[in-house]
């Protein structure tokens, strides 16, 4: 700057300095001070935090329905502290739908509608990092999922790593993700495309334990599925117990209080302890059915791992009995709601036999 008078030059320098300080102050004021409910987590990397996940989070209904894994809808799940949402997505005539095994039997509506609910919740909770894990059951191309994300306006808040694969230690902090506005992390179990970097390949970044277990003694911490280096990857434990219905594994709400407990044989807490022993570290994701069974015990387990206090400001939802309504309205197979198709216990059994026939023919696997 050329100044004809020293006085005016001094004024210009002062003004420039004040502008710079104001910009710095504005930047500092936007930094997150509470992340996922705890100040202590803001400086922790995403890969070093443990999150409770809802297995088949869309499959909502009365626990008497063998195709139901949760009895409260996604909004309530998020309100209560679930931070990973697992989905099974089917391609029905070009439409991506949330179905439990077979859409004709258990259809919970369009993926886009579900994602819109997630977006609404995240808009109301700007200091939260959320993950979505998509089981791409029909091997749909990644661009079709991207269209659903864009339609729900989720692409703008989706985190896209600089490289397709990150070790657990290589993820950004929760605070930086919140500050950047990129605080939704989405994984595809197959079909990821590097040209759509916010839909991240699961198994090069996460390994999983076995699933569909009907014996709690089998909850171990052995690698079941992966495509990467298990010594550096994040990992997920499938901690949901099934029972056999017509020879097929189905959710077991009768034992969910024990399965979701913080301590005791077959509990989530015991499973985490096994992982500490076998792997030398706790899991990143704790995937459970009927998350509220146990009165918040699953969140207590995650809080203990993360070294924070679990003290919800409001009580979490209560288990829904067979005679009470769920927090999500059931939808029909042709609808677009966010609940599992309504079905009585007797009809569920009949449908289970139908699915058994399909499995025998190699058509479907109940997850």
Image (tube, helix red, strand yellow):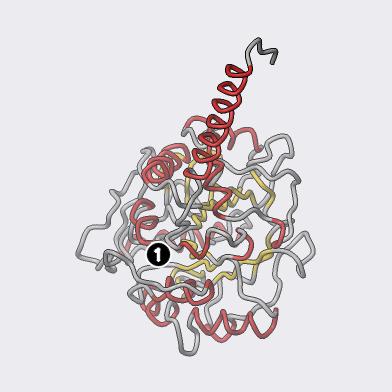
Q: Secondary structure at mark 1?
A: loop
Farthest residue to the right: give it.
229
- At horizontal 47% and vertical 72% (from top left) the residue drawn is 308
Question: Where residue 212 sits in the image (x, y, percent)?
Answer: 56, 70
User: Residue 230 occupies which quadrant of the picture?
Assistant: bottom right
Farthest residue to the bottom: give it.
265
Query: Is the residue marked by circle 1 packed among few (<14), some (14-19), or many (20+) residues within 10 Å?
Result: many
Give the side of residue 19 with respect to residue 57, left or right.
right
Q: Quadrant of the C terminus?
A: bottom right
Q: Which residue is mark 1?
A: 66
Between 366 and 8, the one nearer to me in the picture: 8
- At horizontal 49% and vertical 55% (from top left) the residue drawn is 85
Question: Where residue 237 sits in the image (x, y, percent)?
Answer: 59, 70
Question: Where residue 170 sits in the image (x, y, percent)?
Answer: 72, 57
- At horizontal 74% and vertical 59% (from top left) the residue drawn is 167
- At horizontal 51% and vertical 70% (from top left) the residue drawn is 249
Q: Quadrant of the N terminus?
A: top right
Q: Is residue 270 above or below residue 364?
A: below
Farthest residue to the front: give it.
6
Q: Is residue 60 above or below residue 248?
A: above
Give the side of residue 292 with respect to residue 10, left or right.
left
How many numbered tags mark residues here? Answer: 1
Farthest residue to the top: give it.
4
Between 318 and 5, the one nearer to me in the picture: 5
Question: Where residue 91 sits in the image (x, y, percent)?
Answer: 56, 39
């Amino acid at each position: 700057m050329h100044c004809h008078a020293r006085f005016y030059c001094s004024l210009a320098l002062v003004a420039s300095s004040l502008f710079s300080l104001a910009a710095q102050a504005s930047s500092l004021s936007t930094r997150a001070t509470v992340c996922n409910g705890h100040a202590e987590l803001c400086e922790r990397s995403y890969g070093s935090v443990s999150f409770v996940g809802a297995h088949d989070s869309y499959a909502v209904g009365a626990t008497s329905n063998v195709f139901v894994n949760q009895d409260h809808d996604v909004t309530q799940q998020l309100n209560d502290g679930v931070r990973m949402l697992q989905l099974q997505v089917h391609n029905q005539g070009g439409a991506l739908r949330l179905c439990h095994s077979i859409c004709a039997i258990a259809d919970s509506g369009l993926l886009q509608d579900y994602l819109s609910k997630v977006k609404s919740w995240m808009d109301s909770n700007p200091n939260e990092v959320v993950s979505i894990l998509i089981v791409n059951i029909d091997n749909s191309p990644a661009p079709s999922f991207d269209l659903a994300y864009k339609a729900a306006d989720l692409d703008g808040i989706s985190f896209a790593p600089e490289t397709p694969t990150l070790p657990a230690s290589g993820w950004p902090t929760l605070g930086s993700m919140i500050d950047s506005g990129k605080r939704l992390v989405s994984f595809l179990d197959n079909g990821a495309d590097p040209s759509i970097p916010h839909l991240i390949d699961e198994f090069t970044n996460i390994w999983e334990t076995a699933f569909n277990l009907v014996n709690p003694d089998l909850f171990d911490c052995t690698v079941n599925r992966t495509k990467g280096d298990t010594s550096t990857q994040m990992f997920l434990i499938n901690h949901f117990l099934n029972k056999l219905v017509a020879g097929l594994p189905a959710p077991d709400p009768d034992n969910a209080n024990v399965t979701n407990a913080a301590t005791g044989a077959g509990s989530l807490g015991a499973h985490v302890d096994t992982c500490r022993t076998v792997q030398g570290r706790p899991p990143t994701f704790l995937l459970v059915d009927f998350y509220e069974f146990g009165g918040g015990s699953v969140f207590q387990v995650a809080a203990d791992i993360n070294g924070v206090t679990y003290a919800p400001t409001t009580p979490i939802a209560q288990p829904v009995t067979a005679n009470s309504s769920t927090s999500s309205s059931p939808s029909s197979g042709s609808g677009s709601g966010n609940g599992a198709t309504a079905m009585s216990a007797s009809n569920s059994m009949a449908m289970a036999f139908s699915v058994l026939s399909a499995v025998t023919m190699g058509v479907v696997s109940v997850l």
